[in-house]
Image: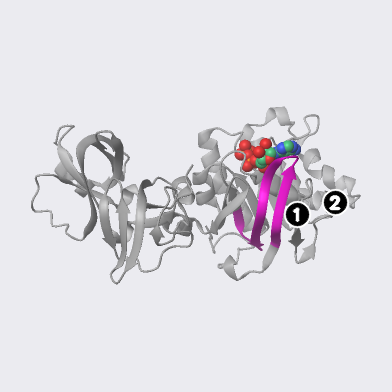
Amino acid sequence: MTNPSADNNPKPINTALNKPIVSLRNIGKQFGKVVALEDVNIDIREGEIFALLGPSGCGKSTLLRIISGFETPTTGELLLDEQDMTRMPPNKRPVNMVFQSYAVFPHMSVADNVSYGLKMDRLARDEINQRVSTVLEQVHLQDFKDRMPDQLSGGQKQRVALARALVKQPRVLLLDEPLSALDAKLRDAMRLELVKLQETVGVTFIIVTHDQSEALAMADRVAVLESGRLRQVDTPSALYQKPVDAFVADFIGRVHTFSTTQIELNNEGAKIQTTELGTLQLPIHTLPPGVQAGAQTEKGAVLAFRPESVSISLADDTSNNASHDALKLPGLLGDVAFQGQHSIVEVTRGDAPSISAIVDHSALASLQDKPLGTPVIAHCDQQNLMLLPDTLK
Ligand SMILES: Nc1ncnc2c1ncn2[C@@H]1O[C@H](COP(=O)(O)OP(=O)(O)OP(=O)(O)O)[C@@H](O)[C@H]1O
Ligand SMILES: [Mg+2]
């Protein structure tokens, strides 16, 4: 996400080397009987865009509110710049929050909205003017400073809310679903704008979203939460390519899963028994954490692969020498959806779930003139098969 050529205060190229600015240690939060968060440990590094991602109700907003100080954790501690802030009131913390419904004051102009917090802090007039003008430029609202909120578009109101938070020069900016009130097209444009803005100001951004494409597109690193528990913290590409379990694999992009009944380690790797695919011998020598060899329960492990790992051949095409493919699933050609760079081909398999394959134009050529229902084979090679703990509900 880093653009080293951007603007006057470029972001360090490798935020992985930066020290943690926010550390969450064993954070738990209960509301009566509801466990909203359980033993969450995360280090967020200075200068990164960090996303909290997960389905509705998984505890994202609660975690953000704990960082902001609007909520106190039931257990654990929160460090900001290595200082314990667990019980520090919100206004004493070097953080600022942009809310889900960006509340701008309707009776104040853009400039007055932005300067309000600084006036409350009793800063000198010159400094206020200077800071407001810098921040309005950063959010491209310098020509709108005298407008009232009802004369602004949704995207412009969002930028006022951002300016109001940034003008206080926080060390960390917290954004709860900052783009959810915008329509789809504006949301895409604002994603890029937020990333550019972060590169300009260099402030650490922690963004809450339930939209995985938003998190993957914007963030340097993403924490995936489910039911109050942290599943994985990683870069977008690592989350996609090396998910730690079936939940993460399924939440980040699309995945096909097959349950396993038994896994045995042997000299060649692992012998994996499945109900649907029979027995497979795969060169997996160490099982992922959470998967044990020997007797498996139904909730043990799944064999998983992504649609872009699937190739498709005609069932009567003997020239296809795919003997290295670990999986060959016969089926019938279903719908083909053109997506520009590639197409998504469905392979139907009677009562079994159909398989989707993402194929490029050359791979599609042999299928193009074939009628729906043509017998085909979906292939996946060994290296693209993932063995994951079954954490799907
Ligand atoms: N003040 C509260 N009192 C009681 N329960 C609460 C309170 N705030 C949150 N919860 C519960 O805690 C859990 C986590 O809520 P939270 O708002 O953090 O979820 P979220 O991940 O932000 O969801 P969404 O994507 O829908 O905004 C939910 O089960 C929610 O009902
Ligand atoms: Mg929320």
Disc 1 residue type?
Thr
- Is residue 378 toward the left or the right of residue 197 in the image? left
Q: Which mark is residue 75?
A: 1
Q: Secondary structure at mark 1?
A: strand
Task: Tell me what residue is drawn at x 67 percent, y 55 percent.
Answer: 39
- Is residue 344 toward the left or the right of residue 44 in the image? left
Instruction: Judge the density around disc 2: few (<14), some (14-19), many (≥20) Cα neighbours within 10 Å.
Output: few
Horizontal and vertical percent position of residue 1: 52, 57
Write down the residue under mark 2: 89
Whether residue 136 is situated above or below residue 269 in the rendered picture: above
Whether residue 9 is situated above or below residue 208 in the rendered picture: below
Task: Tell me what residue is drawn at x 69 percent, y 58 percent.
Answer: 26
Q: Are marks 2 and 1 in contact (CB under 8 Å)?
A: no
- Is residue 199 toward the left or the right of residue 381 in the image? right
In terms of secondary structure, what is the magenta stretch mainly?
strand
**Which contiguous range is marked in magenta?**
22-50
In the rendered image, residue 24 lying in the magenta stretch gets the answer: yes
In the rendered image, residue 181 lying in the magenta stretch gets the answer: no
Going from N to C along the chain, the mark reached first, 2 or 1, is 1
